[in-house]
Image (cartoon, grey):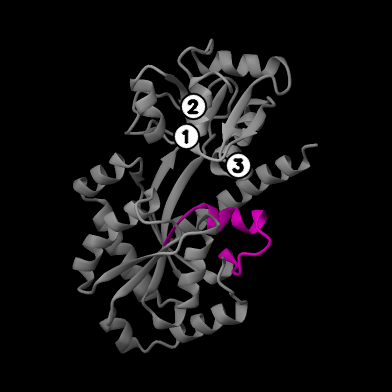
Amino acid sequence: MTIPMTRRTALAGALALAALPAAAEDAWPTAPLHVYVGFPAGSSPDTLTRIITEPLAERLGQPVVVENKPGAGGVIGVQQMLANAGDGHSFATTINGPLTTAARLMKSTGYDAATDIAPVTLIATSPLVLAVSARSDFTDLESFVAAAGAEPEALSYGSVGQGSGAHLTAELFADAAGVSLLHIPFTSYAEVTTSIVGGEIDAGFMAPSAALPQVEAGRMRLLGITSAEPFAQAPDVPVLAGRAGLPEEFRAELWNAFIAPAGTAPAVIERLNTEIGEILAEPEVQEKLLAIGWQAAPGTPADLADRISADTAMWGAVIDRVEAKP
């Protein structure tokens, strides 16, 4: 269930943060940090957060408490952060959905990502791979696109539901390739995987960490990856961009970011950005992230703001096309 959230509540928290005295900013943090995650303990976003927050606590000299608030595709975690905005020590990590597509896919999120959120830093990115059965006739991207282009919806793909990352990525891919694919929604990635391996559907987009064990077992073949350049976890999988008619700039990635309530003191944002950036530069941290399918991708708050804006526009256009379908 979503937390009741009004713009007045968010504004009150922002004003409280803006009123923080300069001396308090210099002494920050003065209490434990609470970092809200909109997914359950043990999930990929939760594990990623804990990889970052353990060394962050050591650097800040205060405990960093990870609070799991799962639900609504990560939106509840963002809502919880905003509900506690006035304490100056509440933050969140989130995948891209709550900041880019949730406002289009839900009746209300209770916040405006453009005005109620202060970007701190991008943490990591994770692309998707286009997977087919190892018994499939499609041995490369070109043969797949050629078959898909022969007849509308001649080929099918699976996802975990309407509006999911895999669904929107497949529709972005289809539009870029100039083809039309048939969407078959499932309730879990396990079902998608089983249906691809068994030949019940033709393909699906999924995380490399989920697909690679199937490839190693000889049950799947990967035709390409959605990142702009090869991904360290799957270095032999070629990028989709620039192949089979797809534009060179084609890219579709899941990402995870560290965010704060709007109005958070600039000095606090800068401190967090610097500390997290240095943490992400450590080879041991990069290896831990890669082991769970994420690649460290730190940057400035402005970089994250640009990414949110660009992806909101890109995925909004995809949602428009999907909703326009008969």
Q: Which residue is mark 3?
A: 161
Q: CA distance from mark 1 to mark 2?
A: 6 Å
Locate the N terminus by quadrant: bottom right
Q: Residues within 10 Å of mark 2 (few under 14, many from 20)?
A: some
Q: CA distance from mark 3 to mark 2?
A: 16 Å
Q: Dividing the picture into quarters, in which one does residue 228 lie?
A: top left
Name which residue type carries label 2: Thr
Point 35% across, 74% down: residue? 268
Say whether residue 298 is left or right of residue 73.
left
Q: Do the residues bearing badges 3 and 2 touch, measured as CB atoms within 8 Å?
A: no
Locate the C terminus by quadrant: top right
- The residue most toward the right is 326
Q: Can you see residue 129?
A: yes
Secondary structure of residue under mark 3: loop
- The residue most toward the top is 137
Say whether residue 75 is left or right of residue 285.
right
Q: Do the residues bearing badges 1 and 2 touch, measured as CB atoms within 8 Å?
A: yes
Where residue 216 sits in the image (x, y, percent)? 33, 21
Where residue 185 sits in the image (x, y, percent)? 62, 36
Q: Which residue is mark 1?
A: 190
The magenta segment:
93-113
Where residue 304 sits in the image (x, y, percent)? 46, 56
Q: Is residue 32 above or below residue 199?
A: below
Point 71% across, 40% down: residue? 322
Name which residue type carries label 3: Gly
Q: Which residue is mark 2?
A: 194
Q: Dividing the picture into quarters, in which one does residue 7 lie?
A: bottom right
**Residue 258 drawn in magenta:** no
Secondary structure of residue under mark 2: helix
Where residue 71 sits in the image (x, y, percent)? 51, 59
